Amino acid sequence: MRVRIFDTTLRDGEQTPGISLSPAQKLAIAERLDRLGVDAIEAGFPVISAGEAEGMRMIVSAGLSCDICGLARANRKDIDAVADAGATYVHTFIATSDIHLEHKLKMSRAEAAERAVSAVEYAKSRGLTVEFSAEDATRTDRSYLSEVFSRVAGAGADRIDIPDTVGYSTPSYMASIVTDAVRASGLPVSVHCHNDFGLAVANALAGIQAGAECAHVTINGIGERAGNASLEELVMALRCLQHGDTYETGVVPELLYETSKFVSRTVGVNVQPNKAIVGDNAFGHESGIHTHGILSNPLTYEPIGPEMVGRKRWLKVGKHAGLHGTVAILREYGVEPDPGQSRVILDRVKEMGDAGQLVTDVELLSMADEVMGKGGVRSLVKLTGFSVSTGIGTMPYAFVKLEIDGKEYSDTDYGVGPVDAALSAIQKITGAASQLRIKDYGLASISGGSSALCEVTVLVADSSGNSISAKSVGEDIVTTSVRAVIDGANRLMLKKVTMRQKA
Ligand code: MN
């Protein structure tokens, strides 16, 4: 069965506390969603502000291939705002639960049903495709809900939606009211599930299995309070967890990760690391038992391959690490310790892990370097010359000379300070030579006083999205920064060269 994906990242997702998008940002996300292959985008709630209406107008005229929908309460002004923004598809709603009728709308059940019917009739008179939602449906009296759905269907609605507004449903209850709704309306049914009890995706899936043909979802599950059903989780569950049923969507799974990243960056909300499909740890392995299994066959500890959703698997070492995983990571850098050396390296990894410290790849490599002695770890990038000048009334300026894989490079640059100038000069060289970029820079002082030790952490990335963080400790901020960057660049290039040689 083909399931329709209705994305509401730009409407319900934007209602996440603290998120506010400009019309241009909304358009940029809409373009990504369209490329991802969603069937419909809820682009906004145009009556609420001029910017919201403008964003809607921009998205409607962007020539996207998916349907573009606007939200409206069940009144003429809201519906007009959607139509006036150029949309041909409205999602109109009125609450039907007694809690909302009594405390919010101050309306009887009969009045609410009447409002719903006139809103649908009015929207149809304006030539719109109409999706009708009974807000708080899952806390609404079941027979009244069926009556409302049957009446809006009679008034000409094209689709109906069951919002689990406060995430109050269970999968089996969602299935029951989807069955009711299909029977009462005879229309295509959508489910709109919230995650207040962590059940949004489970409820949406149950709704679909019971006969709903569409789910309202958001990228990364963003939305009011605990959020909405997350697009990536639902789409992958539909695609992969086929215990007898077969479901398809138009979503291109390989684009899920980059879309998730894009949305997270644009809205400024990070994805939790343990989030399914798109979280940092979703395809990461540290425990020795798991890495051993993964190295023999990824199916042992991964339900799907990371490539399927546009990602890469990573292995890390720590106190749970085993010999296989540790050696496998070193091999990625072209480092081949013998069995005795591997044992010593592993012991050091576990010591660090037990001390509660994180063992990054860079640290693992420096352990290997120490244990294996000269020649164990190759050095691709060498700093062969460096000077910096700074002062008052003069632009900070740096000169850097590097040897990369045997070739000499030098460059100069200015900056806001000596560190900035030095890093810019390095980036000029590594940028041209190997497309490396410094993505993040952090500085901490370890002890006090003007002779304090400083600790510099940098994140260096290459053009294919691989990144590595490196740390350096020293007395001089500028040279310590430069050393950290060179170290990171070195590791990253080593990995690249090794992978190329293997391929
Ligand atoms: Mn909602």
Image: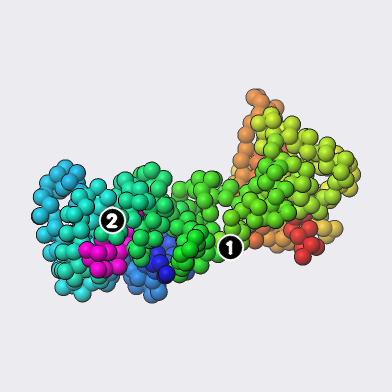
Count of labels in the image: 2
Residue marked by disc 2? 177
Residue marked by disc 1? 308
Q: Which quadrant holds residue 405?
A: bottom right
Q: Residue at x 51, y 48 (%)?
A: 275
Q: Residue at x 79, y 62 (%)?
A: 502
Q: Amino acid at mark 1?
A: Met
| Residue placed most toward the observer, 79 or 58 | 79
Q: Secondary structure at mark 1?
A: helix
Percent coordinates x, y for residue 395 in the rendering: 63, 47
- Mark 2 / mark 1, whichever is N-terminal: 2
Quick check: marks 2 and 1 in contact, CB under 8 Å? no
Residue 186 belongs to the span the image colors magenta: yes
- Per the rendered image, the range of residues in magenta is 181-194
400 sits to left or right of 390: right
Q: Which quadrant holds residue 61?
A: bottom left
Q: Residue at x 79, y 52 (%)?
A: 331
Vertically, is 360 above or below 205? above
Q: Residue furthest front?
A: 244
Percent coordinates x, y for residue 327 in the rendering: 79, 47
Percent coordinates x, y for residue 306 in the rendering: 60, 58
210 sits to left or right of 110: right
Q: Residue at x 25, y 68 (%)?
A: 186
Q: Amino acid at mark 2?
A: Ile
| Residue placed most toward the observer, 475 or 469 | 469
